[in-house]
Image (cartoon, rainbow, N blue to C red):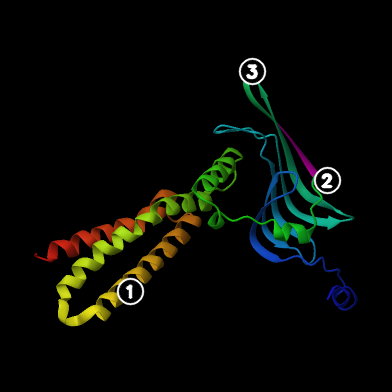
Amino acid sequence: RDIRNEKIFGYRSYGGDIRSNFSFRTSDGWMVRAGFFNGEMGTMNSVSIMDTGREDGKKFALVKRMDADSAAWENGKWRLINGVAREFTEGPSGTTETASAFGSMEAGFTDSPQELSKAQFSPQDMNVRQTAVLASKLKAHGSDFREEMTQYHSKIAFPFSSFLLTLIGLPLGLMAGYRRGMVFNIAVGLIAGLVYWGFMGLSVALGKNGLLPPAAAGWLPNGIFLLAGVYFTALKKY
């Protein structure tokens, strides 16, 4: 495949993946976000690279941040193109920021496109604490943290789904009566679960895109199902 790409299409393939909204942590601890990552060609667009510094409790010290229009894998290193490098220094009067524009500079890490493809991390794969830490770091660095905060709230809200589905399914099953049988009650539970998953997916998508606040996006499905459960319970007269 590499030989075909180099001889026929005119570029060398590095064997990495092609991703949008790509986030990963390098072997040196740098946190990198790219709007578009082409591991096959060894390029990235809309790149933000952050030195997350040292974690001290809940305080995160931002040491350095580099934002660039693009990046390219050249001679075993990543080279940033057209961007701004910022360094942050803690002092008695607070944090001092020094910024300088650049046309081209080395990114500071040497993980190959193939290695970065394996180093991807996603808020969906993290636990609640890890998601909260990542969101805090992104917020401290001035990066977009809506997706991480939305995932954080949805992870807390999701364990309540069993109770909410029972709250809806039980009165519906009782209102239908025993004549419908167990199959009907199981079908009601499955449909309620699918509807909940649909609401959760839609709500999380709205939160990630800024159409809903992260907290509202994470808890909205639970709120809707809670009201529905209370309504159906009130309809059923025991």
Q: Residues within 10 Å of mark 1 (few under 14, many from 20)?
A: some
Q: Is residue 15 left or right of residue 170?
A: right
The span picked out in magenta is: 98-107
Q: Is residue 232 left or right of residue 204?
A: left
Q: Amino acid at mark 3?
A: Pro
Question: Residue under circle 3?
Answer: 92
Main secondary structure of the magenta stretch:
strand
Q: Which mark is residue 105?
A: 2
Q: Earlier in the sequence, mark 2 or mark 1?
A: 2
Residue 69, image x, y percentages: 73, 53
Q: Amino acid at mark 1?
A: Ile
Q: Is residue 143 left or right of residue 114?
A: left
Nearest-to-viewer mark from 2 and 1: 1
Disc 2 versus disc 3: distance between alpha carbons? 31 Å
State the quadrant of the N terminus.
Answer: bottom right
Q: Amino acid at mark 2?
A: Met
Does the magenta run of residues contain 109? Answer: no
Q: Secondary structure at mark 2?
A: strand
Q: Earlier in the sequence, mark 1 or mark 3?
A: 3
Residue 80, image x, y percentages: 79, 50
Q: Which mark is residue 191?
A: 1
Q: Earlier in the sequence, mark 2 or mark 3?
A: 3
Q: How many marks?
A: 3
